[in-house]
Amino acid sequence: METSKTTKRWIILILLLASFSATFMTRFIWSPLGSTVAPILGISNTAVGSFMSAFFIGYVITQIPGGIMADRVGTKYVLSVGILITGLASIGMSLVTVYSVGFVIRVITGLGAGVVMACCSKTIAEYFDQSERGIAFGILLCGPTVGLTIANKLGVYLLTAYSWQTTFRVTGFIAIAIATLVFLFVKNVKSAPLPDGEKSSLLDGVRTVFTTRNLTAVCLAGFFFMFLSLGTATWANSYLTTIGFDKVTAGSIMTLYSIAGILASLLTGFIVKWFKLNTKTYLIAVFILIGIVTLLFGFQTNLNALMIIGFAFGFVSYLPNAHLNALTLKYAPQRLAGSVMGVQNCVFQLASILSPIVIGMSVDLTGAFRACWITLALAPLVGVIFLFVINDKKTAVES
């Protein structure tokens, strides 16, 4: 009986991974298609870029509402409907003939995707205890890389063999298939109703995060961690070309970074569990190490050194995220797990807006690209301050 239950939760985790991957597949499928579709729609490069921004607008909007709905309606329904929306919207993109309609559809794609993280997190909280949540989140957080890889590989193949419309349709049908599997096989996890006389508010999750010291500290530490991650993803390839490497070589270095990141994401939960490490202490050490490796990477010009350090950079950079999410669930009241995760992910995602701009400004103001690596290296070190604020002897108080 116990074996059957264990098998079931890992199958559910695979479905959650597929769901999370689908959001990144639908987000990034535009990347290989943009240059082909732009002249057909008669749009500029700025408009091409705005289709990616449009997705992000929708994605941020539904983070907090998605968490609230996960708590109140249940993860099965919110997750399957969210992925269904992204799939249908992707199919809708194949019918676009004017820019304005495409922009709206991309926002809708993001709206569907924005509910996924909160639903996945609440489901993990139901099936995995605290000692295993780092492992579960590590597997879940391979989703961005899996989705990006599918978007690039499948997108290019379908575009070459068929058409950009077919590419959007196939992407959409994959998402719809995943939504169907989630609806059929994932248990509906939702919060129990409050006892008579107790009232709840739609903003309980927001209030809980910003009135609970540990949750506020985790959110802010995660913001600075994401600031580093998004800044690296945005500027690393450009930096490598400015120091004399062609785009193929720069891409090879960052491919090693990504491979190392997948390995780290898969292993980080096991590292903490096997060696019985304190999560807070582990994160502090990793944040400091990330700052050091960031500087080492940014001040290298030798190809072999960049390959080696790039791999190390990717590995250490992907160690924290699973545990930041696990800590959030540790300190969140069980009935508000979805709402709190929605707020947390919204705070994390704000780094997606600020980091590329701030790093670009640092380069413009100094005239030196290495300024970006100093700025990025400072981010996890600031994050350490908030990690020290966490009182890891405290656990969640149901409220």
Image (cartoon, helix red, strand yellow):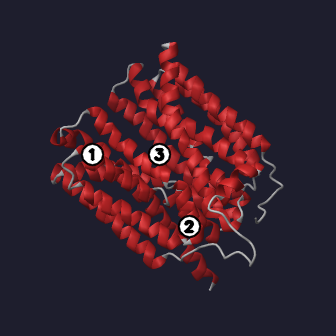
In-front residue for pair 249/84:
84
Of badges 2 and 3, the one in the foreground is 2
Q: Does label 2 or label 3 sit earlier along the sequence?
A: 2
* Relative vertical location of residue 65 with respect to residue 221 in this rendering, above or below: below
Which residue is at a point 71% across and 75% down the rendered structure image?
194
Q: What amino acid does circle 3 point to?
A: Ile
Residue 317: x %, y % from top left: 57, 41
169 vs 294: above or below: below
Residues at circles 3 and 1 in contact by the CB criterion of under 8 Å:
no
Depth check: give the residue in front, 75 or 62: 62
Q: Estimate how packed mark 2 is, as few (under 14), some (14 to 19) or many (20 or more) residues with alpha carbons within 10 Å.
A: many
Q: CA distance from mark 2 to mark 3?
A: 32 Å
Residue that numbered label 1 is attached to: 100
Q: Nearer the viewer, mark 2 or mark 1?
A: 1
Q: Is residue 50 visible?
A: yes
Q: Measured from the top left, where is residue 398 in percent x and y?
A: 76, 66
Looking at the rendered structure, the secondary structure element under dot 1 is helix
Report crowding for label 1: few under 14, some 14 to 19, many 20 or more residues within 10 A (C-alpha).
Answer: few
Q: Residue at x 55, y 39 (%)?
A: 351
**Residue beneath label 2, please?**
70
How far across and down, in percent of the image, does residue 358 sit? 52, 27
The reply to whether the C-beta atoms of the residues labelled 2 and 1 are less than 8 Å apart is no
Rendered-image quadrant of the C terminus? bottom right
Q: Residue furthest right?
A: 393
Compare residues 70 and 391 and report the one nearer the observer: 70
Instruction: Say which label, 2 or 1, has the lower sequence index.
Output: 2
Q: Amino acid at mark 1?
A: Ser
Quadrant of the image containing the N terminus: bottom right
> Which label is found at residue 259?
3
